[in-house]
Image: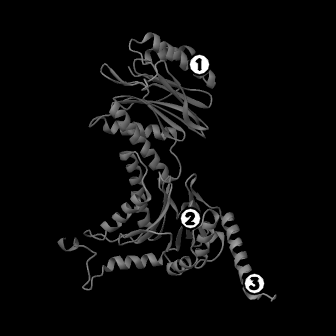
Amino acid sequence: MECVFGLVGNGFAIVAADTSAVHSILVHKSNEDKIIILDSHKLIAASGEPGDRVQFTEYIQKNVALYQFRNGIPLTTVAAANFTRGELATALRKNPSFVNILLAGYDKETGPSLYYIDYIATLHKVEKGAFGYGSYFSLSMMDRHFHSGMSVEEAIDLVDKCILEIRSRLVVAPPNFVIKIVDKDGAREYAWRESVKEAVAA
Amino acid sequence: MARYDRAITVFSPDGHLFQVEYALEAVRKGNAAVGVRGTDVVVLGVEKKSTAKLQDSRTVRKIVSLDDHIALVCAGLKADARVLVNRARIECQSHRLTVEDPVTVEYITRYIAGLQQKYTQSGGVRPFGLSTLIVGFDPYTGIPSLYQTDPSGAFSAWKANATGRNSNSMREFLEKNYKETSGQETVKLAIRALLEVVESGGKNIEIAVMTKEHGLRQLEEAEIDAIVAEIEAEKAAAETAKKAPPKET
């Protein structure tokens, strides 16, 4: 039921992920942030086994930081994507991580990019991608409305269209989403789309 | 083969570990390095031996970052330094991964010192031939610290210290002239200590300043030259003040 999707626009890449943490029929929380900031100009939106998701993405984040200290310059997005895929591939036939990843990044030389990395270590550079049951709806919406070089407003509009489709057509649709963006000014949270607020003690 | 795996560092009859003491000799031959702790900054300085004409000086960085809030300078065998710095960098990230907290300066100093000690008590290895000066800010309290480690694996905290070539003269100077300073004054104190033993000029000194907000910043040659000029002017003014006795009664 986890929904993660993203797309590349004009000088930026945007990813959206649902924010529910679910265990069988219980929703633990509906404000779980599944988009981790890898470094100043990279984001990883991850979905899959909750323990694996946090374990694997934090491991990648710390190794990316280590690279930067060792070498004095940050990894490029393509290098980070290949490193991530490599770690998934190495673990695959011993202790696999059940995590699907959309890696969005911005490099000064090559601009924004989005990488689709699934749990069996498939790696594709894509303009738009999605994981989970929500992908049936978000990919279709993006196929219809996406064009190269969209502005931030157009992209957010498309993201909202996808969220609307997921909410109306998916049987156990997640109520809340978080949207994060990465561009030349860095990786940051853009907005939340909440239809159910976490209950706050009176 | 059995004869070659006994410890290389063994006690002498009068209780010395000669290998460790020889390692300290190696440190004494290394470049001069100084560290000064201020109230809101910590400053590291090191002498830069004149770079060979064909050498790319950007690849010879003596002051290194271990993490966003920790930096290190060392005196002694540079190759040993590379190994130690690499292990420390890994430990900084590993600590962040397991406990979700950045390391404290004391933790990483204890780790490096522990590593150096291990190599004085293992079979078939020699001690690391370097002493380090480690500076940083506590990630939560924001308090600056300066620590020193040596080949024996001992470590302690300092307000200001020096290691490497002529460290005794620099330490004496610091003992005479140390006072609580902040910002630019701390930088000046570090440079003045270094100038006691190093030829003056921006191309012979490397200085880095660490602040809580901006992390580690290496000073440009021009900046260092400007501060050195200030220091020399102050020295000259002090000299003339001494030489000209007050004429009024």
Q: Which of B156/B17 is in front?
A: B156
Question: In this view of the protein, can residue B71 be seen by the observer?
Answer: no
Residues at marks 3 and 1, CA–CA distance in whole angstroms: 74 Å
- How far from the left and from the top, in percent, is residue B217? 59, 57
Classify the position of the N terminus of chain A by image quarter.
top left
Query: What kind of residue is marked 3?
Result: Thr
In the picture as drawn, the residue positioned furthest to the left comes out as: B2
Q: Residue at x 54, y 60 (%)?
A: B59
Asked if the residue under mark 1 is in contact with the one under mark 3, i.e. CB atoms within 8 Å, the reply is no
Query: What kind of residue is marked 2?
Result: Gly
Q: Tag 1, which secondary structure?
A: helix
Q: Which residue is mark 3?
A: B240
Residues at marks 2 and 3, CA–CA distance in whole angstroms: 30 Å
Instruction: Residue B8: name its quadrant.
Output: bottom left
Q: Tag 2, which secondary structure?
A: loop
- How far from the left and from the top, in percent, is residue A155? 59, 22
Q: Which residue is mark 1?
A: A157
Report crowding for label 2: few under 14, some 14 to 19, many 20 or more residues within 10 A (C-alpha): many
Please, which chain is the residue tagged with disc 2 on? B
